[in-house]
Amino acid sequence: MKGGDRKEMGGEKPKPSLLNPNWANLQQKLKSRRPKHSEPESFDLKRKIVERPLGISPQLPPPYLLAGKRKERPEESAASLLTPTTTDCSLTDAIAMDCEMVGISPQGNKSALGRITLVNASGNVIYDEYVRPLERVVDFRTEISGIRPHNLWKAKEFGAVQKKVAELIRGRILVGHALRNDLKALLLSHPKNDMRDTAEYQPFIKTEGRKRALRDLAAEILGIKIQQKEHCPIEDAQAAMLIYQRHKKGWERSIKEHMRFKEKRKKNHKRKKKPTNSDTAKSDGVFPS
């Protein structure tokens, strides 16, 4: 074979083999049916499929279907979050309290205890009683308190409730919202260092110094809605306990730091007041020469 012939053969392009017409038609149909990557036909997320209707551009699935988007999920119901996970109704180191008031005095503008609830650290109710006030009830404040006249017909006497509550909270951490009002209605006191009041905790107070309502704290911290209509003292006590538990570490640390500061200031005050030798001599009527 001559060199010219070899060059001519090397430069020749091989002719493409002809496809069977049926095979070519099948390939064309498959190609036209294949979905494009840029326009997915459906989203399969947690077994929930969002199909794209014909003639409409694809849309993303609802935000609450996307993982990791907690802020965009619907709010949890108060019942689901506050429902205790155990049936343990024992006394715990921390107890949450909430009270509902009724109106006494001629105008009904003076508050008296109408119902009290205590829950333990698990959120289980350990005490829940309607209370018969010492004075005649003028306003049941049902739209807020949820208390109706028939609730107090067989309610316990104030003195019996006061005694029982004092026994239950003695020596324990008392959690609640605006505890001063509740203790005032009970005519009881509690050590300040053992109180965890969500209305008084500094990080919860707004910059202008305004205290926040329990329902606002529950919405922000727990993501639930409470006190929509009539108040439920069980729900309110459970919410206060859960808020405290979410911030327990920092809260307890701030209490310890505050106690250390007070102790240090007390010691420094005692040192300043300690009399010197000259002061002692003067008090005895002896003056240094």
Image (spheres, rainbow, N blue to C red):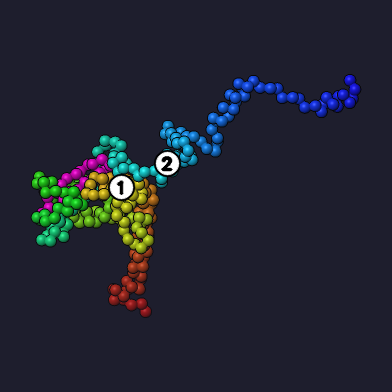
Is residue 198 rendered to the left or right of residue 106?
right
What is the magenta range?
113-134
Image coords of residue 259 (percent x, y):
35, 56
In percent of the image, x 74 and y 24: which residue is there?
A: 15
Please tell me in which quadrant of the rendered image residue 201 appears: bottom left
Residue 23 vs residue 274: left or right? right
The quarter of the image holding the C terminus is: bottom left
Mark number, residue 62 = 2
Tell me if residue 17 comes above or below residue 49 in the rendering. above
Residue visible at 13% across and 59% down? 108
Along the polypeptide, which appears first: circle 2 or circle 1?
2
Residue 102, which numbered label?
A: none
Query: Is 132 one of the magenta-colored residues?
Result: yes
Between 260 and 155, the one lying in front of the other is: 155
Image quarter in which the N terminus is found: top right
Mark 2 falls on what kind of element? loop
Q: Of all residues shown, which one is farthest toward the front?
A: 21
Identify which residue, 185 or 254, lies in the foreground.
Answer: 185
Kind of residue indicated by mark 1: Lys
Task: Name the kind of residue labelled 2 in the image.
Answer: Pro
Q: Is residue 137 left or right of residue 34?
A: left
- According to the picture, the residue beneath numbered tag 1 turns out to be 225
Q: Is residue 285 visible in this depiction of the protein?
A: yes
Outermost residue toward the right in this view: 2
Please tell me which residue lies in front, 246 or 183: 246
Disc 1 crowd, CA 10 A, few/some/many (<14, 14-19, 20+) = some
